[in-house]
Image (cartoon, rainbow, N blue to C red):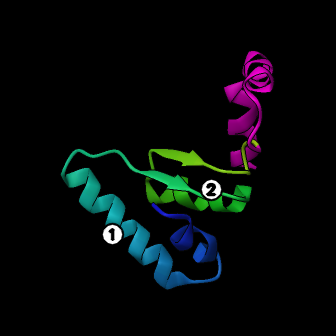
Amino acid sequence: IDQRLVRPLIETPRNRQLISAIVQIAGSLDISVTAEGVETLEHARLLRDLGCDRLQGYAFARPMPFEDLMSYLSEFRPADLEGRLSA
């Protein structure tokens, strides 16, 4: 799902309805859904609750060189992220 739909998600109930419909259609076709431009944990929580399979954006990490990515991944703990999303 393009970031142009994700950005106004928090303030715009209509965007939530649209994203929900996209997720439902994709699910009925057995297609996974990735939301891009997830900038805040509030965006992440809403998109997770709407059923998005994958989330991508600054809420999780900034773009980085390959070496920094390897270091980031070696220290990454999924449970820490889940705790932040549940808060």
Q: Of 40 and 4, which appears nearest the observer? A: 4
Q: Which mark is residue 21?
A: 1
Residue at the location (76% across, 30% down)? 65
Expressed as whole percent of the image width and height from the top left, the position of residue 33 reads 39, 50
Residue 5 drawn above or below residue 47: below
Count of numbered tags: 2
Marks 1/2: CA distance? 17 Å
User: Residue at coordinates 76% horizontally, 50% vertically from top-left?
Assistant: 87
Disc 1 residue type (three-letter): Ala
Task: Name the residue carrying label 2.
Answer: 45
Judge the density around disc 2: few (<14), some (14-19), many (≥20) Cα neighbours within 10 Å: some
Residue situated furthest left in the rendering: 29
Q: In the image, which residues are magenta?
A: 62-87
Element at label 2: helix
Main secondary structure of the magenta stretch = helix
The kind of residue on which mark 2 rests is Arg
Q: Does the magenta stretch include residue 78?
A: yes
Residue 46 on image: x %, y %: 58, 62
Which image quarter is the N terminus in? bottom left
Q: Quadrant of the rendered structure where residue 10 is?
A: bottom right
Q: Position of residue 4 (x, y in %)?
A: 55, 72
Taking 87 as reference, is 72 above or below it? above
Q: Which residue is drawn at 81% across and 25% down?
A: 68
